[in-house]
């Protein structure tokens, strides 16, 4: 890849042995401003760069962060050789953030150069023109609508489009935009000079998605116009033969990808003998690619501060979360500050997402992609020295699942985060990460954790060669499942606690309505069903309602809180207050499911209040919204499935799964609360949770809604058991 990481820079510094000398160096660096006047302009910063002798480089490419000093046009950056002589400089890429990639022409006999940037831009007459013709340059730009069948249209779109990135490459052979971390439409151009060693016939081919146009000496040679898939096999008639004289020839290749997928490949055949193409890659030597060198830029000095902190960034990996398009991204930071500054000093990192670190070279996990202002502060002798750069973070391209990081490696870092410093979207990602770990533990165990059966005895049946598991193995399996479940509950508790701190803490989180609702929909069920803490679940929903700005989001949050107040806590007045607020905000719900839930919770309220007629009316109205189109056969099948699953989960002690099944059941068939079977199972659930008041209240509700229910006697027995137990 050509973007998203800065390679390790060589930092050349002297190892001082006396602390007093270091202090003198620091003092000298801050006593007066340095002279950064070059080419008639006063620059703000400088970085040295060394070109090794004997490499044969004619152009050197380097990259660094410019901490906001280079202007958007890139006109206030210029490379100088020894003797303050400006050399031809080409800014290849600015951004995202404060990232800069540039190239400069190497001067004969010169190895030491300085990159001056920031401050004033020199007059154009002071900037030497680019003359080097070595290398193949790839430039990509944001896509603009154009006629994919017409070269002039594509070329004009490219010229007027906003740049994305550029760098020297060895060949026209890419399957994506190498300067973008996420697939998106783009325009591209390869340009350079072909150095033909021998005159002769040269056949050219192109394969692309979508259009491509190959030009030599400003003349179109071969093209693949339009929107289409790439051609994977060279067919007769696709090669275009031309005569080329020995020497330099201008080369251009335009390409447009109108969708997220892309392909651009150019090939040739020297002195072709057969009409059927036998293409080969155009050798890098044709473009003199070996003349392009890459060297790291050295430590930065500012005009008013000679010794300052500096750091490098590497996007090191990512982890996708289940059913989530937003990945977690791991970034490695490396302090490259001069030793004269960092010896016996304290370092402090601010990562731009509210999190901090005092490690020298920390690993940080960003909860979502984006542009972040990262600041490194070195505090020495009571004085802070700071450096801040805007960095863009996104998941690096992956070619195989094995290249993805494991979530377990991220969790120790995430556990150090302060939830109150996160915005709502990031907080939802933190909760989702903990939930993903819990779900993994609650799922099937890994092969390494499964208990192994003993070798089969000779008397074992042929269709079961390993034999049945022994009682010891069954016990071990049970213990393993119990341990995994206990560990999973720890992560669920961590998720809920993080959400509680973020939503209900003093600072609160910044709330976008979509992120807020997503966060509440994760936290509420986890607290209510998996932890069995209905009071906390209700408080989380009410906190989300206070943070919400949109009335519909407020209404949904109030409705969920009302459901908990009425059905879990039997709080009639609180439930009525929340229901009134929900009804006011959700006067005309757009979704049938939401309208049905509002009717169903009103039915629960009337049942708790003893108004059976109003409760039945509300349940029937809710049923008409979500289940009216189902046949009796379908209804019976689903109701039976819900009932059997709930009973099995209650029997096995999987109360979180029993709760999820019950609540799904009442959402799909609200009128089943009139029959009473679901009410009986709810009472058994609350008995298992030791929430005896909730179970007792259900007996009164069913008596009001349907005193003739066939389940009323069993429900009264459960209520009696609750009276004895509490």
Image (cartoon, rainbow, N blue to C red):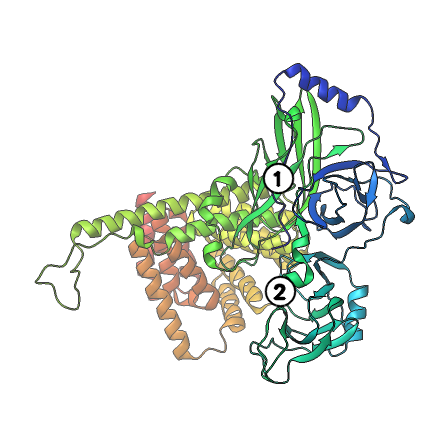
State the count of labels: 2
Quadrant where the C terminus is found in the figure: top left
* Relative image position of residue 536 (x, y in whole percent): 50, 44
* Numbered disc 2: secondary structure: loop
Residue 506 picture quarter: top right
Classed neighbour count for the residue bearing mark 2: other residues with Cα under 10 Å, few (<14), some (14–19), many (≥20): few
Task: Kindly identify the residue that appears in the image at 11 percent across and 63 percent down.
Answer: 460
Task: Please give the label number shown on residue 579.
Answer: none
Q: Position of residue 553 (x, y in %)?
A: 63, 56
Which residue is at 84% across, 30% downward?
35
Q: Nearer the viewer, mark 1 or mark 2?
A: 2
Task: Look at the image and tell me whether residue 657 can be seen.
Answer: yes
Q: Which residue is disc 2 drawn over?
A: 283
Q: Is residue 647 above or below residue 115?
A: below
Q: Secondary structure at mark 1?
A: helix
Please give the label number shown on residue 421.
1
649, 389: nearer the viewer: 389
Q: Which residue occupies the foreground of this view, 300 or 418? A: 300
């Amino acid at each position: 890849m050509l973007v998203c990481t800065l390679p390790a820079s060589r930092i050349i510094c002297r190892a001082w042995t006396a602390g007093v000398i270091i202090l003198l160096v620091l003092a000298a660096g801050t006593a007066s401003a340095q002279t950064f006047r070059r080419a008639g302009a006063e620059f703000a910063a400088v970085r040295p760069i060394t070109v090794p002798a004997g490499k044969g480089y004619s152009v050197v490419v380097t990259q660094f962060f410019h901490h906001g000093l280079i202007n958007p046009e890139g006109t206030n950056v210029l490379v100088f050789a020894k003797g303050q002589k400006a050399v031809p400089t080409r800014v290849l890429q600015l951004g995202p953030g404060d990232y800069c990639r540039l190239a400069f022409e190497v001067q004969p006999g010169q190895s030491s150069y300085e990159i001056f940037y920031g401050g004033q831009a020199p007059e154009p007459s002071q900037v030497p023109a680019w003359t080097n013709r070595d290398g193949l340059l790839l430039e990509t730009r944001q896509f603009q609508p154009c006629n994919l069948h017409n070269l002039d249209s594509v070329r004009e779109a490219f010229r007027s489009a906003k740049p994305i990135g550029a760098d020297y490459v060895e060949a026209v052979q890419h399957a994506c935009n190498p300067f973008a971390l996420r697939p998106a439409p783009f325009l591209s151009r390869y340009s350079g000079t072909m150095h033909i060693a021998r005159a002769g016939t040269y056949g050219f081919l192109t394969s692309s998605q979508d259009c491509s146009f190959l030009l030599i000496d400003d003349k179109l040679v071969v093209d693949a116009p339009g929107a289409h898939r790439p051609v994977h096999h060279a067919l007769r008639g696709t090669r275009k033969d031309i005569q080329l004289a020995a020497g330099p020839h201008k080369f251009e290749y335009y390409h447009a990808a109108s969708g997220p997928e892309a392909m651009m490949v150019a090939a040739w055949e020297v002195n072709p003998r057969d009409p059927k193409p036998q293409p080969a890659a155009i050798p890098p030597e044709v473009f003199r690619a070996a003349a392009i060198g890459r060297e790291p830029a050295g430590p930065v000095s500012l005009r008013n501060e000679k010794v300052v902190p500096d750091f490098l960034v590497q996007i090191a990996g990512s982890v996708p979360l289940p059913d989530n398009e937003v990945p977690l991204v791991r970034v490695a930071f490396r302090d490259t500050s001069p030793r004269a500054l960092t010896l016996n000093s304290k370092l402090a990192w601010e990562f731009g997402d509210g999190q901090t670190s005092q490690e020298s070279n920390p690993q940080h996990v960003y909860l979502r992609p984006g542009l972040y202002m990262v600041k490194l502060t070195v505090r020495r002798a009571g004085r802070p020295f700071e450096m801040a750069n805007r960095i863009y973070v996104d998941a690096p391209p992956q070619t195989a699942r094995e290249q993805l990081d494991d979530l377990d490696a991220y969790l120790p870092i995430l556990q150090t985060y302060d939830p109150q410093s996160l915005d709502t979207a990031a907080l939802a990602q933190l909760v989702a990460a903990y939930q993903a770990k819990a779900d993994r533990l609650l799922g099937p165990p890994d092969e390494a954790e499964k208990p192994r059966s003993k070798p089969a005895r000779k008397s074992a049946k042929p269709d079961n060669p390993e034999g049945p598991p022994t009682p010891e193995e069954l016990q071990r399996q049970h213990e393993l499942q119990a341990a995994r479940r206990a560990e999973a509950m720890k992560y669920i508790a961590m998720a809920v606690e993080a959400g509680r701190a973020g939503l209900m803490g003093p600072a609160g989180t910044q709330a976008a309505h979509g992120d807020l609702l997503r966060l509440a929909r994760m936290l509420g069920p986890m607290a209510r069903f998996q932890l069995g803490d209905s009071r906390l679940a209700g408080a989380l929903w009410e906190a989300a309602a206070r943070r919400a700005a949109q009335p519909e989001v407020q209404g949904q949050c109030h409705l969920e809180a009302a459901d908990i107040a009425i059905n879990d806590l039997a709080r009639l007045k609180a439930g009525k207050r929340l229901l009134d607020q929900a009804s006011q905000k959700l006067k005309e719900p757009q979704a049938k499911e939401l309208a049905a839930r509002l009717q169903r919770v009103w039915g629960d309220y009337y049942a708790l209040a003893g108004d059976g007629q109003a409760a039945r009316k509300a349940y029937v109205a809710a049923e008409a919204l979500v289940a009216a189109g189902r046949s009796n056969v379908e209804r019976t099948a689903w109701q039976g499935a819900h009932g059997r699953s709930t009973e099995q989960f209650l029997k096995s002690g999987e109360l979180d799964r029993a709760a999820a099944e019950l609540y799904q059941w009442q959402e799909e068939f609200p009128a089943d609360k009139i029959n009473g079977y679901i009410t009986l199972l709810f009472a058994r659930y609350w008995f298992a949770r030791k929430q005896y008041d909730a179970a007792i209240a259900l007996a009164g509700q069913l008596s009001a809604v349907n005193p003739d229910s066939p389940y009323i006697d069993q429900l009264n027995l459960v209520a009696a058991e609750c009276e004895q137990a509490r």
